[in-house]
Image (tube, grey):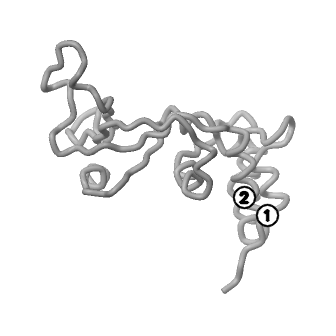
Amino acid sequence: EAARMVLRAPWPACRGITVDLGEEVHLGDDLRPGRKMIEEVADRAHSPIRELFQEHAIKPYRSNPQMHWFRMPDEMIAMQIIDPTIFSEIEKMYVDICTDPGARYGDSMLWDANWNQAANPQWYMGPPPSVGLVDVIKKVNVDRFKQSFVDLMVKPIRKA
């Protein structure tokens, strides 16, 4: 219900990443051939990031090299604030979250901004009246994203 409230709040702008886009980059992907992002961060980052990556990424990877790593939608949404030029093909869409009990609970529901101009639109095919438009990011420059992520993770940590 919290996600639904956020999507229906009167924000001046809201931006999101789809699961499909999030699936394009995983934490264990190669930064370059033969060198994984997690290895680069674990070797070059400063404490405590180095220790966190060694303990929670490198150790599990070594015990199971076939492991499928987490996708990175949260990191992508943060990166689009830092460097929006890494992302392209932003489309305005109506977005809502299913909160009905059952198998679809938590599913994102998306409608094109011009859904009602489709041939024979029906009320149940469109978004609820209280849903607003969201900028949905459709494309990421994967190589630039991975390099920018690693660069941020290995930067010296500023101390207060």
| The image quarter in which residue 124 lies | top left
User: Left or right: 54 with respect to 118?
Assistant: right
Residue 26, picture quadrant: top right
Disc 1 versus disc 2: nearer the observer: 1
Q: Contact, CB < 8 Å: mark 1 with mark 2? A: yes
Q: Position of residue 138 (x, y in %)?
A: 50, 34
* Residue beneath the point at 28% across and 38% down: 105
Tell me which corner region of the image, top left, top right, bottom left or bottom right, holds residue 71.
top right
In terms of secondary structure, where does tag 1 sit? loop
**In front of the other: 67 or 6:** 6
Quadrant in which the C terminus is drawn: bottom right
Q: Which residue is mark 1?
A: 45
Q: Which mark is on residue 53?
A: 2
Q: Residue at x 77, y 71 (%)?
A: 156
User: Which kind of residue does numbered mark 2 sit on?
Assistant: Phe
The percent position of residue 73, horizontal first and vertical second, equals: 53, 45
Q: Does label 1 or label 2 sit earlier along the sequence?
A: 1
Residue that extends furthest to the top in the rendered view of this protein: 119
Q: 144 or 62: nearer the eye?
A: 144
| Residue 10 located left or right of residue 149 | left
At 78% from the left and 56% from the top, the residue drawn is 41
The vertical placement of 160 against 145, above or below, is: below
Q: Is residue 141 above or below residue 150?
A: above
Position of residue 57 measured from the top left corner of the image (x, y, whole percent) = 71, 52
Q: Residues within 10 Å of mark 2 (few under 14, many from 20)?
A: some
Element at badge 2?
helix
Q: Is 28 on the left or on the right of 10, as rendered? A: right
